[in-house]
Image: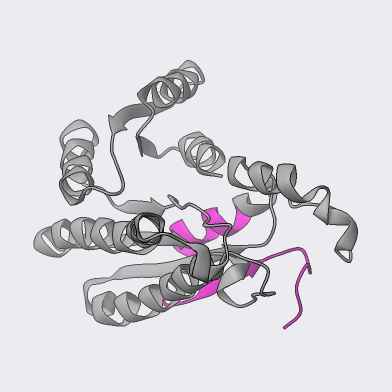
């Protein structure tokens, strides 16, 4: 989903800093964006390392100017029963899914507050924040529920600074993460009311709304985009 988000924001005129571990993929995406007239830089970042997270924000600012939009998209599944998870995996899921978005949000907000600049932060949660069937990935569900609460609390704290903090909770959308699950479980779409997985393009309008002027008064909200896949 991050790849799609980057392209959509760049196509709308944003200067995009792409942050992840795999520089070859980042460079290829940055080149693709530049080839279509956009502006992008690739920044190597390990989401489990606090110094990388803070450093990525500093590098993005040095290359492109003050970061006024942050999309916290990094995340990994656990795909295991809680009692079978080793502590290394527990720490990794917590670090990437919860600690990283907290640190990134704080690093961006510090700079916005210091310069009295308004900004937008969009955290990518998941329908798993609201729904868990008991078949594995309990910790993933816990971390995504925490991302929703993180969104709400930081929105309240930074409202006075005109920093809007919102979240998107996608259902099952075509993505690299979901592909691994489909390999294990088969075609899950046939158990869904509309018999289909979400297309990442169906998230475009929600993302652009949350980072654009139309959502000026919207903060502390989690928008659930799940194609009716889950109950309420």
Q: For the point 17% across and 48% down, which residue is it?
A: 54
Q: Is residue 37 visible?
A: yes
**Residue 163 magenta-drawn?**
no
The answer to whether residue 195 of the structure is visible from this angle is no
* Relative height, residue 232 to residue 96 (above, below): below
The percent position of residue 36, horizontal first and vertical second, equals 51, 20
Could you tell me which quadrant the C terminus lies in?
bottom right
- Residue nearer the viewer, 82 or 5: 82
Describe the colour scheme in one phrase.
Answer: one colour
Up/down of 66 relative to 217, above or below: above
Q: Position of residue 55 (x, y in %)?
A: 16, 42
Question: Is residue 94 left or right of 131 when viewed as pictured?
Answer: left
The reply, left or right, for residue 111 in relation to residue 178 is left
Measuring 29% from the left and 41% from the top, which residue is drawn there?
Answer: 46
**Left or right side of 59 for 179:** right
Quarter of the picture containing the N terminus is top right
Work out whether residue 78 or residue 28 is closer to the camera in this orientation and state it: 78
Q: Position of residue 79 (x, y in %)?
A: 58, 57
Percent position (x, y) of residue 200?
66, 46
Residue numbers of the magenta segment: 205-232
> Above or below — where is 67 with respect to 136?
above
220 falls in the magenta region: yes
Residue located 32% across and 58% down the image: 95
Which quadrant of the view contains residue 191?
bottom right
Tell me which corner region of the image, top left, top right, bottom left or bottom right, holds residue 229.
Answer: bottom right
Report the number of discs. Answer: 0
């Amino acid at each position: 989903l991050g790849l799609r988000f980057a392209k959509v924001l760049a196509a709308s005129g944003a200067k995009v800093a792409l942050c992840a571990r795999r520089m070859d993929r980042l460079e290829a995406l940055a080149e693709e964006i530049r080839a279509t007239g956009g502006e992008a830089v690739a920044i190597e970042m390990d989401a489990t390392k606090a110094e990388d997270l803070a450093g990525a924000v500093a590098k993005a600012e040095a290359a492109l100017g003050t970061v006024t939009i942050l999309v916290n998209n990094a995340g990994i599944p656990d795909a295991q029963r809680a009692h079978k998870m080793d502590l290394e995996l527990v720490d990794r899921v917590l670090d990437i899914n919860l600690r990283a978005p907290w640190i990134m949000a704080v690093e961006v907000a510090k700079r916005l507050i210091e310069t009295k600049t308004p900004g937008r932060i969009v955290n990518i949660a998941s329908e798993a924040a609201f729904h868990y069937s008991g078949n594995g990935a309990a910790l993933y569900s816990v971390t995504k529920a925490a991302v929703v609460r993180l969104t709400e609390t930081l929105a309240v704290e930074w409202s006075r600074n005109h920093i809007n903090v919102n979240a998107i909770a996608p259902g099952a959308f075509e993505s690299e993460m979901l592909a691994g699950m489909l390999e294990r479980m088969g075609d899950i779409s046939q158990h869904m009311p509309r018999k289909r997985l979400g297309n990442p393009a169906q998230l475009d309008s929600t993302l652009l709304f949350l980072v654009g002027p139309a959502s000026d008064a919207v903060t502390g909200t989690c928008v659930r985009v799940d194609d009716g896949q889950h109950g309420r």
